[in-house]
Amino acid sequence: MTTDVVTAAEPAAAPQVAGLSLRQLAWRRLKRDKAAMFAMWLLIFIFGTAILAPLITNLLGVNPYDFDLTVLDPSQGSLPAGAWGGISLEHPLGVEPLTGRDLLARLLFGARVSLLIAISAVAIIAIVGTTIGIVAGYKGGWIDTLIGRLTDLILAFPLILMLIALSPVLTQRLQAMGMSPEDSRVVYLIIVFAFFGWPYLARLIRGQVLSLREREFVEAAVASGAPTRRILFREVLPNLWAPIIVYVTISIPTIIASEAALSYLGVGIIEPTPSWGKMLADSVRYFAVVPTYLFIPGTALFIVVYAFNIFGDAVRDALDPRTGRNAR
Amino acid sequence: MTAYVIRRILIGLMILVLLSMAVFLLFDLLPADPAALTCGKNCTPEIIEINRVRLGLDLPLWQQYIEFVKGLFAGRTYGSGTAAFTCAAPCLGYSFRKGEEVTPLILEALPVTIYLAVGAFVVWITAGVLLGIFAALRRGRWQEKVTLGGALVGYSFPSFFIGLLLLFFVVIRWRLLPYPSYVPPTEDPVRFLQTMILPWITLALVFAAFYIRLTRNQMLETLSEDYIRTARSKGLPERTVIGKHGLRAGLTPIVTAAGLDLAGLLGGAIIVESVFSLPGLGRLAITSVLDSDLSIIVATVLVAGSFIVIANIVVDLLYAVIDPRVRLT
Amino acid sequence: MGKAINNGLRLAAVASAGALLLAACGGGSSESSSAAGSAGASAGAGDSGAAAADGGQKGGTITMLTNAEQWQHVDPQRMYTGADIAFFTGYTTRTLTQYKYAAGADGTQLVADLATDTGTANSDATQWSFTIRDGASFEDGTPVTCADVKYGVSRTFAQDVITDGPTYAISYLDIPKGDDGSSTYKGPYSTDAANDVASFDKAVTCSSDGKTITFNLNRSVADFNYTVTLPAFSPVPQAKDTGETYDDAVVSTGPYKISEYTKGQKMTLVRNENWDPASDDYHPAYPDEIDVLFAQDPAAIDQRLIADAPEDQATIAYGNLQPENLATVFTAGDPRFEGRTYNDYDPYVRYTAINTQLVPNLKQRQAIVACMNNAEYIAARGGDFAGDRADGVVKPTLPLDYAPTGLWDGMYGDTIPVEGNVELGKKLIAESGEPMKPLTYQFPTNPVDEKIAASMKSALARCDITVNLEPIEPGQYYGIVFDPKQAKELMRSGWAPDWLNASTILPELFGATGGFNLSQVQDDQFNAQVQDALNTLDRTEQGKKWQELNKYAAEQAWVIPHLFGKAQALWGSKIGNGYLWFPYGSLAFGDLYVMQ
């Protein structure tokens, strides 16, 4: 899988709608979409538990870092004692093999890390990608050529390979700047996902701007002598919300999944920081003996990615009803 | 048109040169001394210095780069005296950790990756585009919901998860296939297919999901365009409308994505190659990274990057052929 | 599982460092040991090699699966990983002496292979002679002479080309050292006129009939005949030597030769027609062919062996079982695995080195040892399968050199239970007279070592010691921790002796010339005692001195001892003679056969 972020290209350009603003219209449509609403509440719930994780684990009397050897069976090679991966009242989702750390606590704290990385990276991508895309598309000329070559260059890097290859280089540089190794991995992941992510959005936006430039309402604005800034913000940008929002909502799950993939390959988040990708990577080895260990973070990851994808789809449909499932 | 093609190729070459420079620069930032990585426990500063000279690491970075480029086109010689040896062009470097020239390593791994990528590509493009059109034509009906729903589920699974699930159930539980163990198709075609079928399915599942969605969205997008409506109103048969007008215009992003995805995979499908123990470029790359084998990392990044650059050129040229709306700028 | 991806550092150390290419690979299971040998190193006993012809059957193909992409080295002078030595000495590389093919303690018995006996020493063991057997030849039919052995030994001196191998030839042979401590002889490739070939020719002599090779040593080495079990002392034909690339073109002397070697894919060994069984009592040479499949996923290797499908029944694995499968395989009374596993002590001691240059305060080092939670360590390494808590760097499997050090029984002022003694730790820090600085723990990234790092961090936090974690890509690990500028306070490590003598442990780990002195110890008193021990020719007396030094090392808290390790392996049901061959901590590859 080398295409995670590439695959997010979804072109859409909505026309201005009279009366209600685009946003109001979209929200109305979105509210009618039951699956999207469910996905949205689910995501809110996930975000909520992630934010409140320390509170929840305190209430349950568990934490993601402490080893608990009493719940492991040494004669079984330190597998969780008892069936279902050691699920019990004290450990509602069971415990981690070899350490006895509580899986619920690690899942909740892991959500914080995964979401932090994905959202930070996407925020950078959105800002940088949109700005550069608009500049390239609207200004054209040598600026467009330069940006085009730069994005070409970055896109020519084999993504996952670069993420892996750069890991030692960048994390050790970050540590040399005084960052702890755990933090340096998180920052590293944010930086590389953002760095290799923005060109896709910039290209997408540039394409949109190019075609918008040709449209009547923009041409009309240009003809009326409106200043560039006004055209960009009033006429062009509002028509870009759709692709940006769609790109953002579907980038988050791809980044979460990529983080998991990097951890699977051994270059992602490191101990003792909990991370879903790391848990999954670890649990893969226990597939045959402790299947719950794989299925719990696997299902959690799948649900989050799936919810984001449903929501992203619905947002896209709502913003651009022509291609929606209720079209015509 | 010819001028455009030539310019596009020249730009591609320029990007390749820039890419190779960027890679050299990036890995020069590695904190560990690459010369120190060439010898083991008995390392004395003296030996490190000798190896530094043998590797050409004593030269300034730009000179190392020139040496590398020279090796690529004319070959180069490492070391001196009786222990010297020549690395013939195209020389992508020499791995002191593996004790081997890099070019043959890449050439050994490349076919595996090509079989994997192309096989999966055929499956996912066929399935993705056909199901995508199907979904678009059945929009609003349950068939569309099932297709899209299934695609979304497939798309939401991490690829290594699918691969491992397949491996676990098909091979370990149900014993439908022997354990994947790569053999070249020329040696044992049956074993080759038995090994490759699951990796193909894994990759295809993940990618097809995306292409179903993409194709369906593109179809709907273009079908609502004015010229399609015009074509319809002219009374052209639906098949012509969809095949000739709808699909053709809608193909642009599909071709783009397909070209880039295929190129990306040719640079090594790292995760799938890892899950199924396929000795392809991706596996070569990850083992070299964990091994800090710089010369191989640089070479794999360059080879993988070249595929992407070439794919970009091809895609851009196809763009111009397929979509009449695109201006050749 | 997996290869030793280190920078050619030796042994155990290498072991778990390397290995884990993929997250799916199990941590501690990656072992590359170095040799270990027999205890009672009686000089020059004429015990002729004896093939363990215990009902083995000829024929068939043995398939070996490995996670590694390739052999670290096939070149005998560069090979220094236990299982690799066990493999190649079993098939292609004849050494002067070797260990007997047998399970348990018998496996540490020295026997002759290429030599007619296990060597003859002079009275003070400064001169050793070995006679080459009649009929021994290279795969092209050329007879093996002592000149070939001499040439092989000379290659070790070319330290710029022949990297990663053991350097006993350099430290033992009577050749002058230059001002920088390196040998004045620079190996056969040097074109430098100052190259001291004359000294080498004096130190290693070859009789005129080409049969007897004599090594003149710079000091007494009572068990030098164990040293020559290392392939570094095996013959190489000068005419076929290609230096750096000889790794890919090794000329066999054993019952098999390499017919194919494609890195990342496959190696095939087939019978060597020019090997004369009459010249070799050591190799049983049962199978017709040995296939090595590289780059196999570790989880997949285990699953194939567990499933034992018909096509996998003559299959073995390079390395140990993944920890997650131990419970499955070692469930008592499961007939599926009967007779095709071992679960036994390997040659390794696992420990964490404490950098004495960065933690010079003895009390603080002792505090670190006292605070360590070895219960969590053992759990993370697989509970009952991990082994026993270590009390020093010498393992009880070296009966002459081991005595309990008493480290945990009040050596630091109070007993230390396996969970650690927090009060004692805090008290020692208070007594140290200076505040405890934050420490950094360096370890190679792999699933098990990461968990241990997490444990280390929380265990030492109990004594208010801050530990920062510094994971390092396995391939860079030794490059970084052996660089004094980059080495931090705590470093993951492990060690196995090169043969059963603590002379290959204590001086290596803490001595002035030690090759593996991660703790960066500079202790003149210790060095003097090491010299004294080395000069003691009576093996039992020498053992007592090692016991004292091991205890001294524990008192000085140069390392946190963790584990006297165990190893577990599984093989296909049609493989015969599967057992843990103690010297190398692996299967005795050369003794395996396929049940027909």
Image: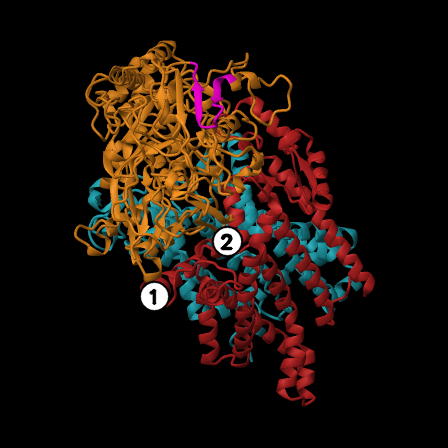
Chain colours: A cyan, B red, C orange
Range covered by the magenta-colored residues: C202-218
Q: Quadrant of residue B117?
A: bottom right
Q: Residues within 10 Å of mark 1 (few under 14, many from 20)?
A: some
Vertical placement of A236 versus C547: above or below? below
Task: Please name the amino acid that badge 2 sits on.
Answer: Pro
Residue C216 counted in the magenta span: yes
Residue at the spot 66% in from the left edge and 69% down from the top edge: B252
Q: What's the amino acid at mark 1? A: Arg
- The disc at residue B175 is 1
The x and y percentages for residue A321 are: 56, 72
Query: Where is the C terminus of chain A found, in terms of image quarters?
Result: bottom right
Camera-side residue: C514 or B260? C514
Number of marks in the rendered image? 2
**Residue drawn where x is 80% and y is 64% of the image:** A223
**Vertical position of residue A15 compared to residue C134: above or below:** below
- What numbered label is drawn on residue B279? 2
Q: Of all residues shown, which one is farthest toward the right?
A: B3
Query: Is A13 displayed left or right of A57 in the figure?
Result: right
Would you say C151 lies left or right of C502 here?
right
Q: Is residue C194 positioned above or below B254 on the image?
A: above
User: In what element is the residue under mark 1?
Assistant: loop
In the image as oriented, which residue stretches furthest toward the front?
Answer: C209
Q: Disc number at residue A48?
A: none
Q: Chain of mark 2?
A: B
Identify the element where label 2 is drawn: loop
* Residue B172 pos. (x, y %): 34, 61
